[in-house]
Amino acid sequence: MSTTHYVRPGRFDNILNGAVGWLARHGISLLGTAELSVLGRKSGEWRRIPVNPLPYEGGPYLVSARGHSEWVRNMRAAGGGRLQTGRRTQQFTAVEVPDAEKPVILRTYLKKWGWEVGRFFGDITADSTDAELLAAAPKHPVFRITVTK
C-alpha cells in the first residue's frame, strides 16, 4: 500500500476548508458535508476538517481524496472520531477498507463528489474501469465508520 501519496492543500483550500467547516459546525451542510474531528496522534488535541461522508451499503464511509493526509494518519492512530453538523455530533469507530474493496466505493464517491474532488484523482473518474479504480485505490484511504453514539 502506498502511504506517500498526498496532495497538500493550498492557501485557497485552507480558506475554503475553514469556511465549510464553520458552516457545518453551525448547522449548514453543503450537500452532506460534515466536520470531522479526530484526536491528533502526536498532540492528543482534537483536529477538525470538513469531509464528505458517503452513505453507501455497509457505510457510511470517509474517503480521503487528497491521499494519506494528516486526518488519515490520525484516524489510523485513534480508530475513530466525531462528525458534527450543527448541534448534532456523532461519535464513531473507523475501520480502514482494504484496497480490493475500494473500487465500488471510489466510483460511488466520484459520482457524488467528483465535481468537487476530481482534481485529486487525476484521470480517474466515476466512469473509470474497475482495474483503473483498483490501481488508484492505494492512493485514497477509505474508512468504514460505525456510529457509537
Image (cartoon, grey):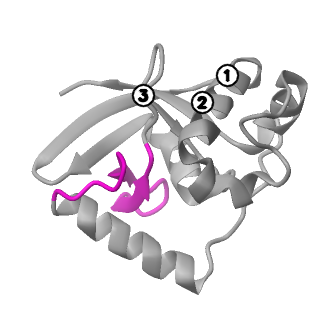
Cα separation, mark 2 vs mark 3, equals: 9 Å
Q: Which mark is residue 104?
A: 1
In the visual, does 109 lie left or right of 46? Answer: right
Residue, disc 2: 108
Tell me which amino acid carries mark 2.
Answer: Thr
Tell me the residue at 67%/31% (across/down): 107
Left or right: residue 6 compared with residue 37: right
- Identified by mark 1, the residue type is Val
| Residue at 85%, 50% in the rendered image | 123
Residue 38 is one of the magenta-drawn residues: yes
Residue positioned 81% across, 32% down in the render: 133
Residue 149, given in percent of the width and then of the height, sits at 17, 28
Q: What residue span does the magenta drawing correspond to?
A: 27-52
Task: Decide which of 95, 77 is in the foreground and name it.
Answer: 95
Residues at circles 2 and 3 in contact by the CB criterion of under 8 Å: no
Residue 98 visible, this angle: no
On the image, the x and y values in percent for residue 113 come to 55, 47
In the depicted view, which residue is nearer to us: 42 or 76? 76
Disc ID at residue 96: none
Splitting the image into 4 quarters, where does residue 25 fall?
Answer: bottom left
**What kind of element bears circle 1?**
helix
Q: Is any atom of residue 14 visible in this view?
A: yes
| Residue furthest top in the image | 58
Pick whichever of labels 1 and 3 is earlier in the sequence: 3
Separation (CA) of disc 1 from disc 2: 6 Å
Query: Do tag 1 and tag 2 residues touch (Cβ < 8 Å)?
Result: yes
Say few, some or many: other residues with alpha carbon within 10 Å of mark 1 (under 14 / 14 to 19 / 20 or more).
some
> Which disc is residue 55 wearing?
3
Amino acid, disc 3: Pro
Q: Measured from the top left, where is residue 136 in percent x and y?
A: 82, 39
